[in-house]
Amino acid sequence: MRKKISILIFLTLLSVHYFAQSPLQANAGNNFTLCPGATVTLGSSIPATGGTSPYIFNWTPTAGLNNSSVANPTLTVSNSGYYVLEVRDSNDSLARDSVFISVPNLSIYTAGKDTAYCPGNASNIVLGNPINATASGITFNWSPATGLNNPTAPNPVANPTTTTIYTLTVSKGSCSLQTGTVSVSLFGL
């Protein structure tokens, strides 16, 4: 009888231990916005909980990651996208979570094509790519401001008195990118 009680107690303890274990969960961290070319550490401070350690980590996609098989890899971003964290525990349980990295595509807003006009005539040369006018939440800065009707317009009108090379810098939030230059020259000068 004593042997049956011991076995029953052991099985009861075993089942209590089995049901008391919390399920495996992965935590890829919060979504966020980064500037093109920025480097960030992915994952949360506690990337896995529950299940039975040790954990095996796998991040996808692997492009831009310094190591896809660690809890908190370093990512150099170039495009927006989801990064998925898979965590496997020693019991072969699997948990997934994802994080979305938003990267503003500033490189589509360009300075336009080099052009020339005759001195003494109003040039009314419009700088920039037509797509610049469709920008939302983007700040434009043309330098130098000389000869421009508005150096912060997406497509300013240029009337320089000498050949001038304008540089366009576009920004969204704290992200800033110099996207190109355009030369406005005068015929005969």
Image (cartoon, helix red, strand yellow):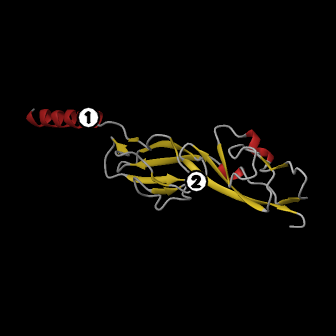
Q: Secondary structure at mark 1?
A: helix
Q: Indicate the secondary structure of the residue bearing disc 2.
A: loop
Looking at the image, which is closer to me, 171 or 62?
171
Residue 15 is marked as 1
Task: Answer left or right for 52 relative to 167.
Answer: left
Question: Residue 5, position in %: x, y?
Answer: 13, 32
Q: Quadrant of residue 46?
A: top left
Horizontal arrangement in the rendering, residue 185 relative to residue 111 (left or right)? right
Task: Point out the residue furthest to the front here.
Answer: 120
> Can you identify the residue that label 2 sits on?
36
Instruction: Quote the CA–CA distance across marks 1 and 2.
Output: 52 Å
Using residue 15 as the reference point, say whether residue 147 is left or right of it: right
At label 2, the amino acid type is Pro
Q: Amino acid at mark 1?
A: Ser
Q: Identify the residue at the far left of this view.
A: 2
Give the class, few, some or many, for how many residues have Cα within 10 Å of label 2's Cα (few <14, many ≥20).
Answer: many
The C terminus: image quadrant = bottom right
Of the numbered discs 1 and 2, the one sitting upstream in the chain is 1
Density class for disc 1 (Cα within 10 Å; few <14, some 14-19, many ≥20) is few
Q: Position of residue 75 (x, y in %)?
A: 49, 56
Name the residue: 37% across, 41% down: 24
Q: Nearer the viewer, mark 1 or mark 2?
A: 2
